[in-house]
Amino acid sequence: MRSLSGVIAPRDRQFFDLFEEAGRNILRASDLLDQMLRGYPDKANLARDILICEQEGDRITHDIIERLNKTFVTPIDREDIYSLASALDDIVDFTEEVADYLGLYKIEAPMEQAQRLAHILLEASRAIAECLPRLRGFGDISHYTVEINRLENDGDRVTREAVAALFEGATDPMVVIRWKDIYERLEEAIDSTERAANILEGIVLKNA
Amino acid sequence: MSSPLDQRRLMVLDADSGFVRVLANRVARVGWHLDVRLAPIAVETLAAMRLDALLLDPRALPGAGEDYVIAVCEALPALAVIVCSERSTTAERVRALRLGVDDWVTKPCHPEEVLARVEAITRRRLRAQAPVPPDAFVAGDLEIRADRFQAFVNGRSVELTRREFEVLSMLVKAEGRVLERADIYERVWGYTMVRGDRSVDVFVRKLRAKIERVSPGWCYVHTHFGVGYRFQAEPRDSSDEPRKSAHFTARSHAGP
């Protein structure tokens, strides 16, 4: 038996298409960052492809907001659509910032902790990308949100260890400045996946 | 234009006036000093003339036969000796080359080619006689020049950056000992290595790629997993695996 919200929900499914497109874009951007850091500095030129993902993310967010402004009745709450679009956009924005900072700060070699954080971000992005299609039917997404939460905790732990390592011994202050910034951006990207997962969980709870 | 002090000096012992005239024009064009004689010169006189190369036709000049050529080659091993002659047997040419003649050109030939051969031989000799610079290390094909912050393979620069050179230099100075990553970092970068920093690995990878491009037959930097790196020149065999190690040679160096 269909729920009441299902009966009165509008037929405009374009929002779901756009969210899924955003999910694929997030996965691509984080996959590129993971490759870039694993193969750095040889794969430093992937920053250009990540920038294209960031521009694509902006375009998708713009399309969602434009559609939101033109649609009288939306399939999910306006505030939720807006929050989710922003959180998804943040993931790609922070991902792109990491790639950009590697070049901007003239990083010569990667840190193992940064490689691990980029991999955690990739796994969290994959969970987001796989979770978003389930939003159409407001199905159970707890498997994904639990996984994203676990990954975010891992990300916090690795970031703390990474920052602590920067302050052990007589390290180069320039290395500390550069990598602390980069770790913070990586952590923010991972945090954004958790924020997106929390919004998704709220949407499903309200509409199930 | 070269100064008289560093001007190359060529003597021609040949009675073939047409050939010598054309050759003289070419020699003048490259800035060499040319001395043409129609009779053999005593070996002692030749030594005093500080020649770089001697071009002669033993058949054209009486007294400049095989015995004369052998005497010159024995007495002046640093002198480039080139025979340019008509009609000769393979046995004559082989014998002359084995007794010290650097090249044999059969007439008729183009003076330009003869001059090019003379230049090539003297160039090689000058290179071989070049004074060994201080702090030059040689291992396999690789010559590491601390005075130029660069490594060379057969005179060709490996084009290392300063930091790549410093990593290489540190490994070379360890003379076959394994150096830990943290030690390399501390001594090259001057700071404590942050745990997880891959800088040393990245620079060693770049170093290997650059050296391998110009010296593919040798393996120089060896990885000791979980520890660090070791420098030892080892020739690669056909299966691309390092074989036996070649002795590390320090031509001259001030420190360890």
Image: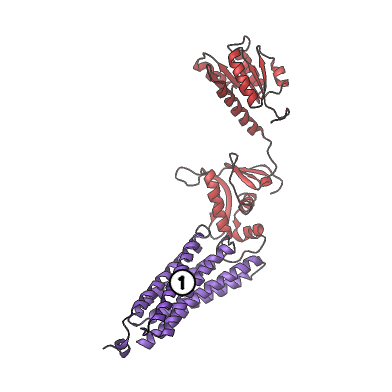
* Mark 1, other Cα within 10 Å: few <14 / some 14–19 / many ≥20: some
Give the colouring mode of the picture.
Answer: by chain
- Identity of the residue drawn at 61% across and 66% down: B194
Q: Does the rendering let one see residue B135?
A: yes
Q: Position of residue B79 (x, y in %)?
A: 65, 24
Tell me the colour chain A is drawn in. Answer: purple
Q: Residue at x 73, y 27 (%)?
A: B4
Q: Position of residue A181 (x, y in %)?
A: 59, 71
- For the residue labelled by badge 1, is the local secondary structure a helix, a strand or a loop? helix
Which residue in the rendered view is the most extreme toward the top? B62
Which one is in front, A169 or B6? B6
Q: Is residue A149 visible?
A: no
Q: Amino acid at mark 1?
A: Asp
On the picture, is A65 further left or further right than B21? left
- Quarter residue A137 falls in: bottom left
Q: Nearer the viewer, residue B14 or A156?
A: B14
Kindly identify which chain the residue marked by label 1 belongs to: A
